[in-house]
Amino acid sequence: MMGDTVVVLGGAGLVGSLISRILVQYGYDIRVVDRRSAEHERGFHQVDVMSPFSNTEQIFKGAVAVVFALPESAAIHAIPWVVSSVSKNVVFIPTCSVQEPFYKALKDASPLQPFVGINPMFSPKLSVQGRTVAICLEERDSPSTFIEQHLMEAGMKVKRMTPVAHDELMALCQALPHAAILGFGLALARSSLDLESALEVMPPPMRTMMALLSRVLVNPPEVYWDIQLENDQANHQRSALAEGMERLMKNVRDQDYDEFRNDLQGISNTLGTRLSSGAVDCQHVFSLLN
């Protein structure tokens, strides 16, 4: 597909820039569409996808794919505009943290439009080597797509799944840990203790939680808001987290050590063979913090 055109909506952002850099390596002509300037002015179109001006068809002329590197609501809002500007064989590639709402909106607007969702399971600021990218397809066993091939050629691993399966998994792997980290942060903010004094004595688990919280706080809030708000499955995981805390509080209130021990054993059984390797991972993290 050397020389083919790919339009990247939101291409000036972190994820859009990452996708653009990868595809440029393989000879694609990239057209970046964003409200703000991109890294490279060549092929840049300053357009607000939420209220595009008329006569934008030239942006999509000759495009084989359109990447929606946008928040979920903005990506879905842009679907009718893009559908009206491209042919039925142009591939729609959302990078949303939640994929099913986009997929359903696309199929309502253009049932035959090709769809390949991608969700990098890492920060675009990190090296891509060895990182995993979730690939969303209507059928998991469908033929390999060009974007998959290039992601793997660039050193990434891909994991195929349907949009529904993706959102269920992301509720567990993203919404749940983020909720736990944010809950820790809210509790920390309410503490009356001197944080500077705590910094001098905090053990590795506290330092790890502080690092995770800080990582969240230095990134744009909308990233984590979309993960919590847009994924219908996330509410179930937040409820499970709250129920777990209630369970712990009850055990302590009742001074019921046996139930506490049984709960920990149940968690260990759930982890199974992952328990030992997870403990090793934690030891590596703690050694770095020392």
Image (cartoon, rainbow, N blue to C red):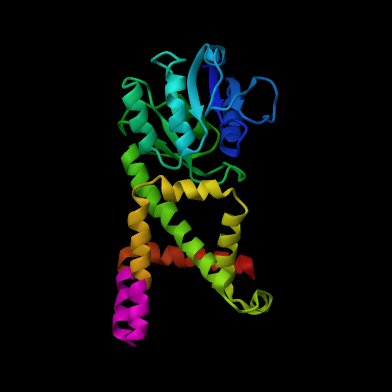
Q: Residue furthest bottom?
A: 255
Question: For the point 33% across and 62% down, which residue is it?
Answer: 240
- What is the magenta range? 246-268
Left or right of residue 35, residue 275 in this image: left
Point out residue 22 in the picture as x, y percentages from the top left corner: 58, 30
Point out residue 174 in the picture as x, y percentages from the top left corner: 44, 52
Asked if the stretch drawn in magenta spans residue 264, the answer is yes
* Residue 75 position (above or below residue 214): above
Instruction: Give 22 or 103, whichever is nearer the viewer.
Output: 103
- Per the picture, the main secondary structure of the magenta-coloured stretch is helix
Asked if the stretch drawn in magenta spans residue 126, the answer is no
Left or right of residue 118, residue 109 in this image: left
Image quadrant assignment for residue 105: top left
Image quadrant assignment for residue 42: top right
Instruction: Give 192 or 176, whichever is nearer the viewer.
Output: 192
Question: For the point 51% across and 67% down, which residue is it?
Answer: 184
Point out residue 63 in the picture as x, y percentages from the top left corner: 51, 16
* Residue 122 position (above or below residue 8): below
* Residue 210 position (above or below residue 167): below
Instruction: Give 222 or 288, whichever is nearer the viewer.
Output: 222
Q: Is residue 11 visible?
A: yes
Question: For the point 53% across and 11% down, which residue is it?
Answer: 61
Q: Is residue 264 visible?
A: no
